[in-house]
Image (tube, helix red, strand yellow):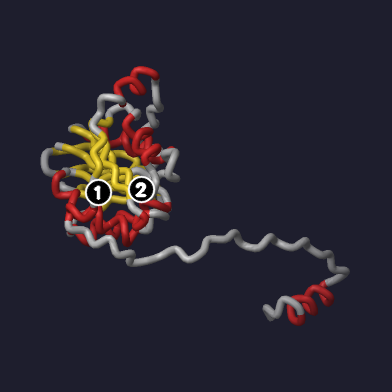
Amino acid sequence: MSVLVIAEHDGKLLKSGSASAVTAATQMGGDVTVLVAGHQCAEAARAAAKLAGVKRVLHSDAPHYKGSLAENLAALIVPLAPQYSHVVAPATGFGKNLMPRVAALLGWPQAAFISGIAINGDSADVTREIDGGLEKLTIKLPAVVTADLRLAEPRYVTLPNIMKAKKKPLEVVKPEALGVDVTPRLTTLKVEEPSKRGAGVKVADVKELVAKLKNEAKVI
């Protein structure tokens, strides 16, 4: 049994959800491989190698993966996934956007926002958070999951792990070697913050409030 963890990062640092996903993967049993895909993200790949429980790191670096767009990353993950019994990502916006696409392309079952998992041979019993409480499901393996922060406490970097990381394999994965078309399917044109909220105003009475809603806000 082996697990592939998809790391979320900003190019230099791993997001905290990635550490939780790695911890969850170690609890599932077997070897843990972390995929760090992005552009100019070698520092994040080295950080992944320092996490406890990680056996090896796959590093794929190309302009195509800048911004971690789901459409682009999924095409890289799909040819790698059949080597593993699970594919795990953090249950963040990153995992929420990426993993349903990966599961659909692979034809594998998916369990999202899991807070508990137990492996039983060729299936897994999972507990996931829903609005009404907890939901328990049984899914067949191999499977795609996103790990909730409550599934496992992240084990952060220790000095021994920093020393061990120097000996861990850091394999460079070329998309072309996997038959992946690196032509961007989507491109981020611009990212900007929303405009700042204006100051509020006080009104003397309901009549003035209705007038402003009608004439200025134009919502009635």
In the image, taking residue 198 as reference, residue 108 lies left or right, namely left
Dot 2 amino acid type: Phe
- At horizontal 29% and vertical 64% (from top left) the residue drawn is 183
- At horizontal 18% and vertical 32% (from top left) the residue drawn is 30
| Element under disc 2 | strand
Residue 42, x across and y down, in percent? 36, 40
Label 1 crowd (10 A; few <14 / some 14-19 / many >=20): few
Asked whether residue 127 is in view, the answer is no
Dot 1 amino acid type: Leu
C-alpha separation, residue under disc 2 versus residue under disc 1: 12 Å
| Element under disc 1 | strand
Please identify the quarter of the rendering in which residue 208 is found: bottom right
User: Is 157 above or below relative to 217?
Assistant: above
> In the depicted view, which residue is nearer to us: 148 or 25?
25
- At horizontal 40% and vertical 65% (from top left) the residue drawn is 187
Asked if marks 2 and 1 touch (Cβ < 8 Å), the reply is: no
Of badges 2 and 1, nearer the viewer stands 2
**Which residue in the structure is indicated by mark 2?**
113
Residue 50, x across and y down, in percent? 34, 28
In the image, taking residue 197 as reference, residue 192 lies left or right, namely left
Which residue is farthest right?
A: 204
> What quarter of the picture does the N terminus occupy?
top left
- At horizontal 39% and vertical 18% (from top left) the residue drawn is 159
**Which residue in the structure is indicated by mark 1?**
137
User: Is 19 above or below relative to 186?
Assistant: above
> What quarter of the picture does the C terminus occupy?
bottom right
**Earlier-in-chain disc, 2 versus 1:** 2
Residue 103, x across and y down, in percent? 24, 56
